[in-house]
Image: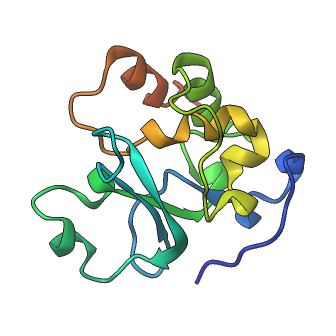
Amino acid sequence: MITTVAIGAEAGGADPAALLCPSAAAEPGRSVVFGVAGAATRPGEVAYLSSPVPVPEDVAALTAPVPPNAVLRTAAPCAGAGCRHFSGHNCTLIERIAAALDPVVDRPPACAIRGTCRWWAEQGRAACVRCPQIVTDRAAPSEAYARAMAPPERAEA
């Protein structure tokens, strides 16, 4: 079960486990669906649910023949150091998205996870106006999109 806590935009120093990753894998028992891709007026953009719903056990069958994260936006507790996009302090994924991709909406869309979203906590409005274009498993992404999604290269220990 996901525990949510009220946080503000200055929550960058919060415990990563208290924040949700809005680009998490669709895992039953761990993540929630907060949006559906392709349901918005423009193909490839996300329509947000009024409240998150748990990812069902049969999620792969429900979205077949495409992977769940090609059509669902799901959130789960931030994995912190266990994530290849986490720098130790921040999510480098949203940093790259904010730097590489243009906003797709003028105002942050209504979002049921904003109060606990790591991207909102770190980047605020800059994250939210780009978020509707993010689909974790996107077919044929643009060059800029693919670059933004690529995890940083880590030095060998």
Q: Residue at x 74, y 41 (%)?
A: 88
| 50 versus 128 height, above or below | below
Vertically, is 102 above or below 17? above
> Can residue 89 be seen in this snapshot?
no
Instruction: Tell me where residue 20 appears, x and y as whole percent.
Output: 64, 60
Would residue 63 appear left or right of 1 to someone viewing this image? left
Direction from residue 53 to residue 157 in the image, left or right: right
Say left or right for 135 vs 21: left
The number of numbered badges drawn on the structure is 0
Quadrant (top left/top right/bottom left/bottom right) for the C terminus: top right
Nearest to the observer: residue 69 or residue 157: 69
Q: Residue 74: percent from the left, percent from the top?
A: 46, 61
Name the foreground residue: 116 vs 155.
116
Residue 45 appearing in the image:
yes
How does the figure colour the protein chain or chains?
rainbow
Q: Which image quarter holds the N terminus?
A: bottom right
Q: Is residue 120 above or below residue 28?
A: above
User: Quarter of the image holding residue 130?
Assistant: top right
Is 138 placed left or right of 51 in the picture?
left
Q: How far across and down, in percent of the image, does residue 78 sit?
A: 63, 58
Residue drawn where x is 49% and y is 31% of the image: 151
Q: Position of residue 13 (x, y in %)?
A: 88, 49
When the figure is inspected, residue 118 is found, relative to residue 87, above or below; the finding is below
Residue at the image position 48 percent from the left and 24 percent from the top: 148
Residue 40 vs residue 152, the one in the foreground = 40
Q: Residue at x 29, y 27 (%)?
A: 141
